[in-house]
Image (cartoon, rainbow, N blue to C red):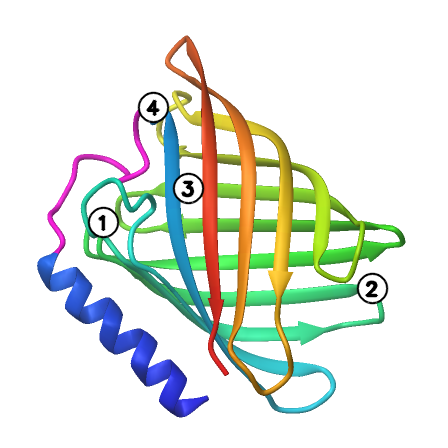
Amino acid sequence: MRTRSSLIFALAFVLGLFGRQQNALAEDGFHPSRLRLILHGSKKLNDRITLTARLIPSPTLRGTLTPLVFGGVKVRLGPSFTLAPQAGWSFIKNEPFLSLGLAFAARPLVLGLQVDYRFPSQQGYVFATAEVPVTDWLMVGVETENWGSLLSPAWSCGGGPNLLFQLKQAKSLGVGLDVAAHIRSLEGQTQPEIFLRFHVFLP
């Protein structure tokens, strides 16, 4: 975990040096398609606690490099409920942020929620999912992703159906692909978007 976490944080630092600053959130505006890469690292301490690290080089790879790096812990509070508090750094405005993730499994439904708060800019982010497993490597469901300033009601809100593919084996590199079709609303306008998220799970 130490090597994987160091790699993730080092990559975030280098990408941040080359990334350019943007106004408001890097996610602002409409995009016909969004492409995101997410690197995951983890170290299981026991049956209940796992250390976690994540790196997102940019909210959309079609934009500039503005990494977000996360570090935290995932705590299994019961057979169906997981709590994942994290802290990190956003190179979007060079500021820290706090993140809280929740996961709840009520067979066959799997629910997920992530809430971020960036300060001092007071930007918020909310991502929620509800999926049903179809096979060991495929889930189908719906999701919503929203962001904006806590000082303004003009948030960018989007959501729609998704497909989640994941190929991961113990002690080996894992990969995943999320495909989602969003209808996004921003400042009275509504447009469709295709969202692709590529996941790499470091061994």
How many other residues sit within 10 Å of disc 3, few (<14), some (14-19) or many (≥20)? many
Q: What amino acid type is highlighted by mark number 3? A: Gly
Q: Is residue 50 magenta?
A: no
x, y percentage for residue 71? 42, 72
Is residue 31 shown left or right of residue 167? left
Q: What amino acid type is highlighted by mark number 2? A: Ser
CA distance for labels 1 and 3: 13 Å
Q: Which residue corresponds to mark 3?
A: 124
How many other residues sit within 10 Å of disc 1, few (<14), some (14-19) or many (≥20)? many
x, y percentage for residue 124? 41, 41
196 up-or-down from 158: above or below: below
Give yes or no for contact between labels 4 and 1 (Cβ–Cβ under 8 Å).
no
CA distance for labels 4 and 1: 17 Å
Task: Looking at the image, tell me whether mark 4 or mark 3 is earlier in sequence order.
Answer: 4
Magenta part of the chain: 19-29
Q: Which residue corresponds to mark 2?
A: 80
Choose mark 2 or mark 4, whichever is in front: 4
The secondary structure type at the circle numbered 1 is: loop
Q: Which residue corresponds to mark 4?
A: 30
Q: What amino acid type is highlighted by mark number 4? A: Phe
What residue sits 38% from the left and 43% below the top?
35
CA distance for labels 2 and 4: 36 Å
Task: Looking at the image, tell me whether mark 3 or mark 2 is earlier in sequence order.
Answer: 2
